[in-house]
Image: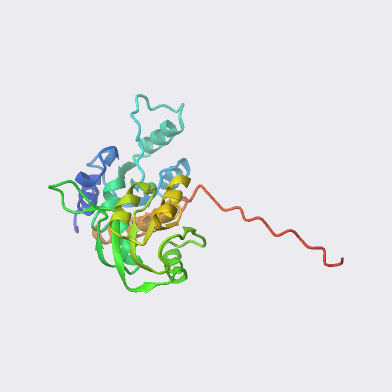
Amino acid sequence: MTGMAICVENVCQILRQLAPLLTAESWDNVGLLLGRPERTVSRLMTCLTLTPAVAREAITRNAQMIVTHHPVLFRATKTITSDTIEGRLLLDLIEAGIAVYSPHTAFDNAEGGINQWLAESLGLNSIEPLRQFPQGIYGGSGRMGVFAESHSKHEFLEKLATAVGVEHLEVSWHGAERVSHVGLACGSAAEYLTDAFQAECDTFVTGEVRFHSAVECQSRGLNLVLTGHFSSERPAIVRLAHVLSDRLFGVECFASELDRDPLELFLRRPATVDSTG
Ligand SMILES: [Zn+2]
């Protein structure tokens, strides 16, 4: 778009093209969640999760719109007051005139969405959805693909760690020795384990699962790799800021810097050995 000032609704249109809301899960809360569609946008911030720190960052950096992957107002809300954390966050955004849009599961599954990007960044070929959408809707959720040449466990894990930008992965390797057919779904996606197994994937990648899902993979002989929920989705948020920059002429789009993994690793130091004897 060129020439005229961009408004919130123009950004929403682009986001709906990028991730059609029809494809979001039925339990989800997606689209424009806060704000006036006619308000002008010249600065836009993307984030994975809209925490109080991220909201303050948006205000400090003079954004007029936030695109947050994880929705706010997810539960039915009867009051918005400063008595709750979410109430304070929303009031701060309203008072600063900041609009909020969330594409969530629509963006997970979109043709140019998180799972597709993840599959492409691993270098998979013949990428297809793990599960087709119900009849009448094109596309599907999760992704699977094959490597032109199979990878060793080590090669594959290095490649994945690079793709999502982490120093550690959680791994349950009780399936095929070499990786050739990979299923994946970002976030917390144990629900796709059966789809991956039925599609004859040898390895499944997601952000996080419960202990018993890992045990199930072990029993079924499906390799399982966990990147952490944050790491499975955050690279796509940075990429989304670039995509929106390209599509929204005159709007400065940037990813939040305070959008961080709430979890960190505690690495115990080896006990110090007294060398003097
Ligand atoms: Zn998520």
| Residue 132 point in image, percent of width and height | 21, 51
| Residue 32 point in image, percent of width and height | 27, 41
Vertical placement of residue 81 versus 71, above or below: above
| Residue 116 point in image, percent of width and height | 29, 59
The structure residue drawn at horizontal position 25% and vertical position 58%, both measured from the top left corner, is 112
Name, please, the residue furthest toward the left. 136
The structure residue drawn at horizontal position 45% and vertical position 50%, both measured from the top left corner, is 214
Residue 103 visible: no
Q: Is residue 275 left or right of residue 37?
A: right
Query: Residue 145 is drawn in which quadrant?
Result: bottom left
Name, please, the residue furthest toward the front. 219
Query: Residue 221 is drawn in which quadrant?
Result: bottom left
| Residue 134 point in image, percent of width and height | 18, 46
Residue 14 visible: yes
Q: Quadrant of the C terminus?
A: bottom right
Q: Is residue 127 left or right of residue 175?
A: left
Name, please, the residue furthest toward the right. 277
Q: Nearer the viewer, residue 182 or 137?
A: 182
Vertical placement of residue 90 versus 262, above or below: above
The structure residue drawn at horizontal position 36% and vertical position 44%, both measured from the top left corner, is 70
Q: Nearer the viewer, residue 164 or 192?
A: 192
By what rule are the colours in the image chosen?
Answer: rainbow
Q: Is residue 112 left or right of residue 72?
A: left
